[in-house]
Amino acid sequence: MRDTEAASEMTPRMRVRARSVLWGLIVGGLIGATAAIALAPPKGARFEARQPWVVAAPSAQDWPRAPRAGERARLVYGLDGATLVVTGADAAGARSLARAFAGWQSPGPPALQEALARLRLEWRTEMPGESPPNRTKVAECASILFARAIWGRTLADRLPIPAPAVPPLDAVPPEGVLSGWDDVREAVTANNPKQLQVALREAAARENAWFANRDLWHGELAAVRAERWRRWQDHRAEELEARAERMLMTQPLLQRRFAELAVHPHLVAFDETLSDPWEPFASADPATLRPLVRPIARVWLPPIEWGAGIGAALALAFALFRAWGRARALAAEAERLGPLVADPSEAGPSLHVITGPTAAAVTRGALELAARRLAFGERVLLVDGSARIRLHERLGRDARWGLLECLAAEMPVLGLIQYAGHPGLYLLPHGNAERAVGWSRLGQKLEEVVPHFGRIVLALDPQAPAEMGDALLGAAMEGWWGQLDSGFSRALEQATARFGIVFHSLDLELMPEANLEVLAARVAALRPAGPVPEPAPITAPVPAIRPEPVQPALEPIVLDCDLQVLERLRFLAWMRRLQADHRDPGLQATT
């Protein structure tokens, strides 16, 4: 088989690469799915927002507004607990509902401060107009204990945070809180009202610091911590009420009545000396929350599937139609130009000219032509004939002297050729592009290296100077166009007119990139079975020393003349022969 028989096959056979079809299906599917989503989106609930949840599911009165189409809230249980799932027609609506429910489960500081302000206003409104009569120390201590118990129970009941669906365990107080309550018990035993008020205020401050320390609660939500605080207040209220009742049992009936009248003033006075008891349970502003919002897969999947299917089918049809059109165009081109020689035989020309619409296409075409001879163990020389192509950069070679220096300074071509990075492949760079040279000796310079290479690939720009075509006029060469498309461009027509040869279409699908790795893989795929001879090193030709030919002595020419003249001429001829016999034969002179 000829080495590049498939490179420029001009038959109407359709050729579709599997990778091109695969990429076409992927791109077509993506475009089709996007179009389906844009033109026929699903109706109803399309997005959902999720956030951790510990309380009961929101009821109808807990919604911030009337639910719209597709909006719903439900609980989903997993290994990490319950999760509130809020659905909506759009991502913004689902996110806003999730934020509103988060604010209901864990209110922010403004909501808690407003509720506490209303409660304190009610306490001040219920204050009696007259001060209660004087009381004994025991009755006064009992009144203070009742005030503290009512204060804790009322705050626990009016805290605007819903209770968790699963009741948590009782909190284990730290040593500081227990020590504060021991001081309260000592003040009760001593029947000292002032000491008791100080001890209760200190115990309340320690409780507030305990519940405000987030590190002690291991990331528990505000609703869980609030429920633990409620239980703690209930336990403390039960203990204080029991102690107060035992103390009043020892007092007369009138003192009991006086103690009951003093409970509410003590409650208001005690509350005014404390900081905000609900502050530890305030959560971040719900507007700053970013719950996880994602599309509902089961809703979006049907339109995406049929859209992707239609897009992939259209992409496949387009790929087949493009391949059919390309085959038709190549057949028409072959019919217009006649049968094209795919690749020269062994006796054909070794000079190949490659050009194309882009520098990358020219480089890929040059490597494709080189690979088809490297696979048979021949040496190939790449000649960069254009400053735009820059073959040395694409092959990772040096940008040193090259073709322009050979033409301008009469430098030897073999002295400027460099190894191109693959066995048997050599490169002659373009050279200094700023140098102005004439192209008249281009053909002569290429003829100097023809005996040393099985193939010479001259890479040119389609807009190459006309002098290059004149310099190569009459030379045996093949032309290639580095692009397999639906037709030949105007640049190709100009190159054909400039060089006077037909440029064959070169298929570059098997050379997708212009680098040495792809070239090595291409050479390995083209290499025939059996060992491949290594190319011999390039050596400069040594001129053969030709000895000068030995010319025999010429006989004297005897002319008809006088006898004396004849005798003198014979004598001179004899003397000349005698002298010639005693000299170096290489230095003999002819008469």
Image (tube, rainbow, N blue to C red):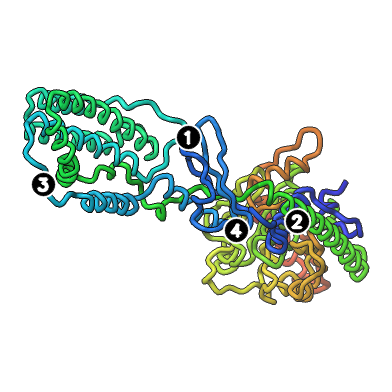
Relative side of 467 to 314, left or right: left
Q: CA distance from mark 4 to mark 3?
A: 57 Å
Residues under numbered marks 4 and 3 in contact, where contact means CB atoms less than 8 Å apart: no
- Binning the other alpha carbons within 10 Å of mark 2 as few (below 14), some (14 to 19) or many (20 upward) gives many
Q: Which residue is mark 3?
A: 131
Q: Quadrant of residue 349?
A: bottom right
* Circle 1: residue type: Ala
Q: CA distance from mark 4 to mark 2?
A: 28 Å
Residues under numbered marks 1 and 3 in contact, where contact means CB atoms less than 8 Å apart: no
Residue at 63 percent of width and 50 percent of height: 515
- Tag 3, which secondary structure? loop
Q: Which residue is mark 1?
A: 165
Residue 205: assigned label: none
Q: CA distance from mark 1 to mark 4?
A: 27 Å
Question: Which of the two marks, 4 or 2, is nearer to us in this view?
Answer: 4
Residue 322: percent from the left, percent from the top?
83, 62
Residues under numbered marks 4 and 2 in contact, where contact means CB atoms less than 8 Å apart: no
Q: Nearer the viewer, residue 27 or 105?
A: 105
Q: How many marks?
A: 4
Q: Which residue is mark 4?
A: 68
- Tag 1, which secondary structure? loop
- Binning the other alpha carbons within 10 Å of mark 4 as few (below 14), some (14 to 19) or many (20 upward) gives few
Q: CA distance from mark 2 to mark 3?
A: 82 Å
* Circle 2: residue type: Gly
Q: Which residue is mark 2?
A: 307
Q: Tell me if I can see residue 581 in this picture.
A: no
